[in-house]
Amino acid sequence: MTTPAGPYALAPDASAENPALSADEQQFNDLIAADSRIEPRDWMPEGYRKALIRQISQHAHSEIIGMQPESNWITRAPSLKRKAILMAKVQDEAGHGLYLYSAAQTLGATRDGMTDALIAGKARYSSIFNYPTPTWADMGSIGWLVDGAAICNQVPLCRASYGPYGRAMVRICKEESFHQRQGFEILLELMQGTEEQRAMAQESVNRWYWPALMMFGPPDDDSPNSAQSMAWKIKRHSNDELRQRFVGMLVPQAAVLGVTLPDPDLRWNEDTQQYDLGEIDWAEFHEVLAGRGASNAQRLQRRRDAHAEGAWVREAAAEYARKQSERSAQVAS
Ligand code: BYC
């Protein structure tokens, strides 16, 4: 973890009154130290506001782009029940994106600005959504591994120091937990099926396992934002801690499913009381972040097309709002 620089670089210590700080700064530090919440009306350091906009907008974009790999399977889901479940899940992801965009708006970011950055390819979203979904088993792997990783990362975010972010995360985590179970159940059904279905489930888990571990971000010694984010109590645990927790959660679930996690070096370490993991391919992670993953271009193009196709809806809504306010003004005069 890199040591942050600047006036807010240290974890605030409420017990130490610092005469160099303004009353606003002291109050901010006291709220953070007391594990209380910062609300939109409160004074906050510019760096804190920017860090939140960065993380929350990236998170919102991930939810919105993350609808694509699964919506791609709605028409091909193997039964009416599976179609209904998948459709509800994809709608949930849209909802998550909207709560998160709203949370970022409370910090002064504009919805148009965030959308423009995304469709211009200037904003980040989770690396995981740049992988293709060629088989039905991928719907199981996304639920089990991707939503599973999301829960592991996001449950601590329910205690994020910024009120609107933490509160949005509570509902999101409840829904993610349903998503994770539905993915597990798809894989369980496949693993209890024919030889071909079992092979399809295992092949899919093989493809998604490592990218799911990358969702937690770079290793701690290569994570420029972690130290400051943790000092501000936006993040509560480091990237590696959460990755480790996730693998600990997966191992017994994989045994119930009967799938093998594709890491020959994975083994329990009595001394550390956690699993030793094989080497993650960080070169692949950086390629995906640089826009050169298997599906980066397709995901962005689809988002651009959807935005262009939705222009008439935005124009109609704006015109309706204009007419409504004109009418209210006439009634009032
Ligand atoms: N992908 O200093 P670091 C879902 C970037 S959606 C891409 O460790 P930080 C779902 C990072 O942004 C769930 N970029 O950063 C939806 C930073 O770049 P910048 C999505 C990544 O912020 C639909 C740089 O690398 N979850 O569940 O301290 C269907 C250095 O990293 C990634 C969230 O967004 C990555 N994987 O920690 C199904 C969770 N990792 O901005 C499911 C909220 C790192 O300096 N976000 N980068 O240019 C977080 O918890 C944190 O932002 C992260 C990264 C742990 C992701």
Image (cartoon, rainbow, N blue to C red):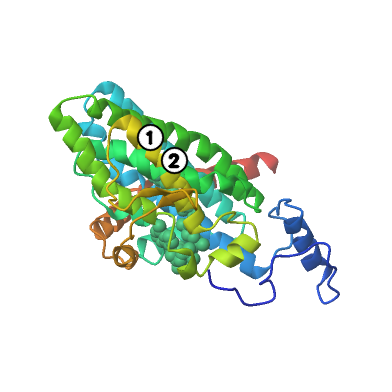
The structure residue drawn at horizontal position 69% and vertical position 65%, both measured from the top left corner, is: 11
- Can residue 331 be seen here? The reply is yes
Q: Where residue 25 is drawn, which disc sits there?
A: none
**Label 2, label 1: how far apart the Cα atoms are:** 7 Å
Which residue is the extreme one toward the left?
196
Quadrant of the rendering where the C terminus is positioned? top right
The structure residue drawn at horizontal position 52% and vertical position 55%, both measured from the top left corner, is: 56
The image position of residue 188, as x and y in percent, is: 29, 28
Residue that label 1 marks: 253
Amino acid, disc 1: Gln
Residue 15 vs residue 169, the one in the foreground: 15
In the visual, does 76 lie left or right of 328? Answer: left
In the visual, does 216 lie left or right of 34? Answer: left
Ligand 1 located in image quadrant: bottom left
The answer to whether 107 is drawn above or below residue 322 in the figure is below
Disc count in the image? 2
Element type where label 2 sits in the image: helix
Q: Quadrant of residue 252?
A: top left
Q: Is mark 1 within 8 Å of ligand 1?
A: no
Residue 245 vs residue 287, the one in the foreground: 245
The image position of residue 249, as x and y in percent, is: 44, 40
The image position of residue 73, as x and y in percent, is: 24, 37
The answer to whether 139 is drawn above or below residue 223 in the figure is above
Q: Where residue 249 is drawn, which disc sits there?
A: 2
Asked if the residue under mark 1 is in contact with the one under mark 2, i.e. CB atoms within 8 Å, the reply is yes
Amino acid, disc 2: Met
The answer to whether 250 is drawn above or below residue 32 in the figure is above
Element type where label 1 sits in the image: helix
Crowding near the residue tagged with mark 1, few <14, some 14–19, many ≥20 C-alpha atoms within 10 Å: some
The answer to whether 164 is drawn above or below residue 196 in the figure is below
Crowding near the residue tagged with mark 2, few <14, some 14–19, many ≥20 C-alpha atoms within 10 Å: some
The structure residue drawn at horizontal position 33% and vertical position 41%, both measured from the top left corner, is: 142
